[in-house]
Amino acid sequence: VGTKLRTGISIYRREEAEKIVAAAVQRGFAVATHAIGNAAVDVALHAYEAAGSELSRVGIPRIEHGSFLSRDLVARIKGVGAAVVAQPHFLTLPTYEAAASIPGVRNSPLRWLLDAGVKVAGSSDFPVAGFDPLDGIRSAVHRRTVRGVEYEPDQCIDLDEALAMYTRVAAEVSGCLRQCGTLEAGKRADVAVLDGPLSMATLEGSRVRATVVGGEV
C-alpha cells in the first residue's frame, strides 16, 4: 500500500511530445502515438490537449496500444476525441498467465473505453500476436489467457462490438471509411465468408471459408 512501481522506456518528455504533435498537425498530418503504459498515455494526451481543436481537423488522433489505463485517462482520451488501437489477443501471450491486475488500472480496458464513447479499433501488432482477426475478436469477447483463465473479465465486450472494432471502426480511425470497413454500394468489396452464422455459440469454432479483397476471390 502506498508504493509506486515505475517501469518502461520513456522516449519523449512532455514538452518534446507537445512540439512533435504541434509540428505534425501544422503540416496536415493526422497523429498516432505509440503509448503503452499509463505514464506514456499521459504524455501523449498532454500533447493532444495542447494541440487543441486543430488536432481533430487533420484526422482522428490515435493512441496505439493504450494498455494500462485508469478511468481518468479514459475520460481524457474521450475529451480530446482520440481513438485507441487495441490488441485484445495480447492476453494470450504467456506473460499474462501470471500477471497481476493493478488496482485502479485495467489492461486493455475495452469495456471502460466503449462505455465512455471512445472509438476502439482492433489490431494484432503482428508478429507479437497472431494476425487472424477472429482470434482478436475471441480475445476481446472472452479475455482468456493461454490456459483459458479470464483476465479482468469486467472488460469483456459483446460480439457485435468486437466485430465493429475489426471492421468499421478500424477503417474509420485509419481515415478510409469512405472506401472500406462496411458493406455498402460503392465501397471496396472486402468480404470474409465464414463456415456458418457467427454468434457467441459458434465464435470459438468459426473458420474462414473464403476471402474477397477488392472484389477478387
Image (tube, rainbow, N blue to C red):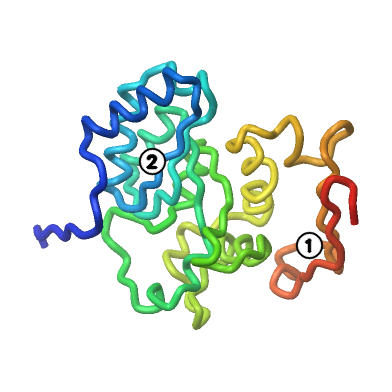
Q: Position of residue 38 (x, y in %)?
A: 29, 49
- Kindly check if marks 1 and 2 are in contact, taking CB atoms under 8 A apart as contact: no
Residue at left offset 53%, top offset 66%:
127
Residue at left offset 33%, top offset 30%:
20
In this orientation, which residue lies closer to the viewer: 189 or 106?
Answer: 189
**Amino acid type, residue under disc 2 in the picture:** Val
Q: Position of residue 185 (x, y in %)?
A: 89, 33
Which numbered marker is on residue 198? 1
Seen in the image, is 128 located left or right of residue 174?
A: left
Circle 2 — which element? helix
Circle 1 — which element? loop
Q: Residue furthest left?
A: 2
**Amino acid type, residue under disc 1 in the picture:** Leu
In this orientation, which residue lies closer to the viewer: 198 or 186?
Answer: 186
Residue at left offset 67%, top offset 47%:
164
Seen in the image, is 136 located left or right of residue 65?
A: right
Rendered-image quadrant of the N terminus? bottom left
Q: Position of residue 198 (x, y in %)?
A: 78, 62
Q: Residues within 10 Å of mark 1 (few under 14, many from 20)?
A: some
Which quarter of the picture shows residue 16? Answer: top left
Rendered-image quadrant of the C terminus? bottom right
Which quarter of the picture shows residue 80? Answer: top left
Seen in the image, is 188 located left or right of residue 8?
A: right
Above or below 55: residue 69? below
Badge 2 is on which residue?
74
- Please tell me how many numbered marks the rendered image carries: 2
Above or below 215: residue 133? below
Residue at left offset 40%, top offset 41%:
33
Q: Residues within 10 Å of mark 2 (few under 14, many from 20)?
A: many
In this orientation, which residue lies closer to the viewer: 140 or 200?
Answer: 140
Q: What is the C-alpha distance between the residues marked 1 and 2?
A: 30 Å
